[in-house]
């Protein structure tokens, strides 16, 4: 009988696991990849690179692209750090 209750919660548990995977997957990206993407965006957009990344991150949030949102957040932080170094 308890198995029927667990089966009822299976979709909800699956959704939570899926969301957690999308949130934590960008944290597993190598720092070198994030730095390369940040430098590439700085080369393309110059001083506006951080603003463009923030706009892209907002777009990812609005379209429920969680992985892309957190990846862009890391890239934005790296661009800000690189701008502070310069």
Image: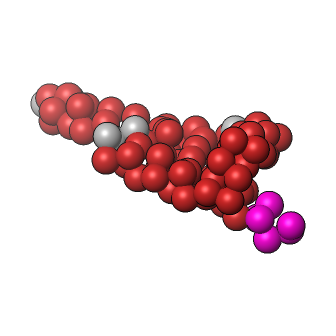
Q: Can residue 85 be found in the magenta stretch?
A: yes
Q: Which residues are magenta?
A: 81-86
Task: Pinpoint residue 24: horizontal percent, then vertical percent.
Answer: 56, 44
Q: Which residue is more in the foreground, 48 or 14?
A: 48
Q: Can you see residue 59? A: yes
Task: Pinpoint residue 32: horizontal percent, then vertical percent.
Answer: 82, 40
Which quarter of the figure has residue 10? top left
Say above or below: 48 vs 36: below
The answer to whether 69 appears left or right of 15 in the picture is right
Q: Can residue 34 be found in the magenta stretch?
A: no
Q: Residue at x 38, y 46 (%)?
A: 59
Q: Residue at x 49, y 39 (%)?
A: 67
The answer to whether 49 appears left or right of 62 in the picture is right
Quadrant including the C terminus? bottom right
Say above or below: 49 vs 9: below
Which quarter of the figure has residue 7? top left
Which quarter of the figure has residue 19? top left
Q: Which residue is more in the foreground, 9 or 43?
A: 43
Q: Residue at x 46, y 52 (%)?
A: 55
Q: Can you see residue 13? A: no
Overall secondary structure of the magenta section: helix
Task: Pinpoint residue 1: horizontal percent, then vertical percent.
Answer: 13, 30
């Amino acid at each position: 009988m308890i198995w029927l209750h667990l089966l009822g919660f299976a979709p909800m548990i699956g959704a939570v696991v899926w969301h957690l995977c999308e949130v934590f997957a960008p944290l597993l990206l190598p720092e070198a990849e994030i730095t390369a993407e940040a430098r590439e965006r700085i080369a393309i957009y110059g001083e506006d690179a951080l603003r463009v990344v923030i706009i892209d991150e907002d777009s990812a949030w609005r379209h429920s692209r969680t992985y892309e949102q957190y990846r862009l957040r890391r890239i934005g932080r790296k661009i800000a750090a690189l701008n502070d170094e310069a």
